[in-house]
Amino acid sequence: MRRLTVVQLLPALESGGVERSTLEVAAALVAAGHRAIVVSAGGRLLPALRATGAEHVALDIGRKSPLALRCVPPLRRLLLREGVDIVHARSRLPAWLGRLALATLPAARRPHWATTVHGLNSPGRYSAVMASGERVVCVSQTVHDYVLRHYPRTDPRRLRVIPRGIDPALFPRRPLPDPAACAAVAAAHPPLAGDGPLLLLPGRGTRLKGHADALRLLAALRAGPFPQARLWLPGAREAGREAYLRELEGEASALGVAGAALFTAPTSHIAQAYAASDLVLQLSRKPEAFGRTVIEALAVGRPVLGWAHGGVGELLARLQPQGAVPAFDAAALDAAAIAMLRQPPPLPATVPHTLQAMQRATLELYAELAH
């Protein structure tokens, strides 16, 4: 394949799955001898992007204001000046600005147009731009079906399911139990030390992540066969979310589990956190587009229990069906947790959703477009 110049569009480079995927694809492009350019407002991941060998152009294309239209002329000039082959939009406002820039170019010099649907956005005209690509990457079969359901005029031949992936080297299989991981976590967080099972729910400090469901599950386990059960919620303690944290702490007190639940900032050692746990929870109240924590935990060798909807339900059905529980059925959740703690279910020997597979499939899609 000839050397390509690919521009990725996203609002900023702060944190999150969209940003992570952008860096991963940029790294794969550079490693394969192509040119990777990212257009965004910048952010804390900018040094990591540059370390891949990719280039960055600072434009505030995620600013939800009429002033964002000022970005169209410089974006148009960039596409012409750099001889761009493919423009890949990963978010709605950048996609609209990208389409406006492309529309003003002569057809002979117009790059190919790709989009990725990273989330189950509210359907409507604004979100419809994400289904406009010559190729539309869907991060799961759940997203693929969502796009066709809400945008039925989309040609299904333009859709490509490319699941997100993890680097297996960062999430190696660990024994269950893992005394070293348990000791390290207990040393860092003494309230998590103990003999009972440790439940883990990683997730931001938002009601959508199902923290309250996890607290109710903890109360049921401690009132039943696992009186020493504990729950760790890394990420629940987050700047700007103090009121929500107080609400959770009040809920824990009312349930009688305040001393058994620990709310912390996100951990920078998430693989170790998985290894120290006995059961990983994924209880998002809103269906997720993919559900990265599911494959991370399974790769480490920890069973996962989650609501059977969205991308989480899709992954569990395929990789560990015993952990898929009808959404918001608390009794079923309690019963499944007890069964899985008493007898951990068989886990997949390997997790198929790898970073390398995602990168390879994305570069193949670019080659298909540029053919």
Image (cartoon, rainbow, N blue to C red):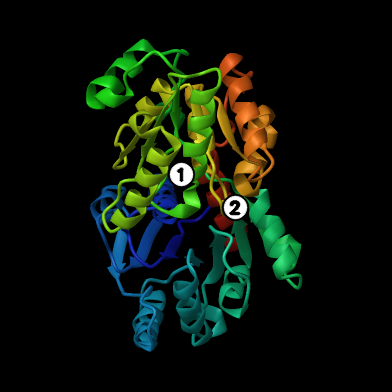
Q: Which residue is mark 2?
A: 287
- Mark 2, other Cα within 10 Å: few <14 / some 14–19 / many ≥20: many
Q: Position of residue 350 (x, y in %)?
A: 57, 24
Q: Is residue 65 left or right of residue 105?
A: left
Circle on res. 211: 1
User: Which numbered disc, 2 or 1, marks the residue closer to the eye?
Assistant: 1
- Mark 1, other Cα within 10 Å: few <14 / some 14–19 / many ≥20: many
Nearest the camera: 351 or 190? 190
User: How many numbered marks appear?
Assistant: 2
Does residue 208 sit above or below 198 in this rendering?
Answer: below
Q: Secondary structure at mark 1?
A: helix
Which residue is found at the position 60% from the left and 52% from the top? 287
Q: Position of residue 333 (x, y in %)?
A: 62, 34
Displayed quadrant of residue 254: top left
Does residue 181 sit above or below 66 in this rendering?
Answer: above
Which residue is found at the position 48% from the left and 21% from the top? 278
Which of disc 1 and disc 2 is earlier in sequence? 1
Q: Position of residue 95 (x, y in %)?
A: 49, 73
Q: Which amino acid type corresponds to the residue marked 1 in the rendered image?
A: His
Which residue is found at the position 65% from the left and 30% from the top? 319
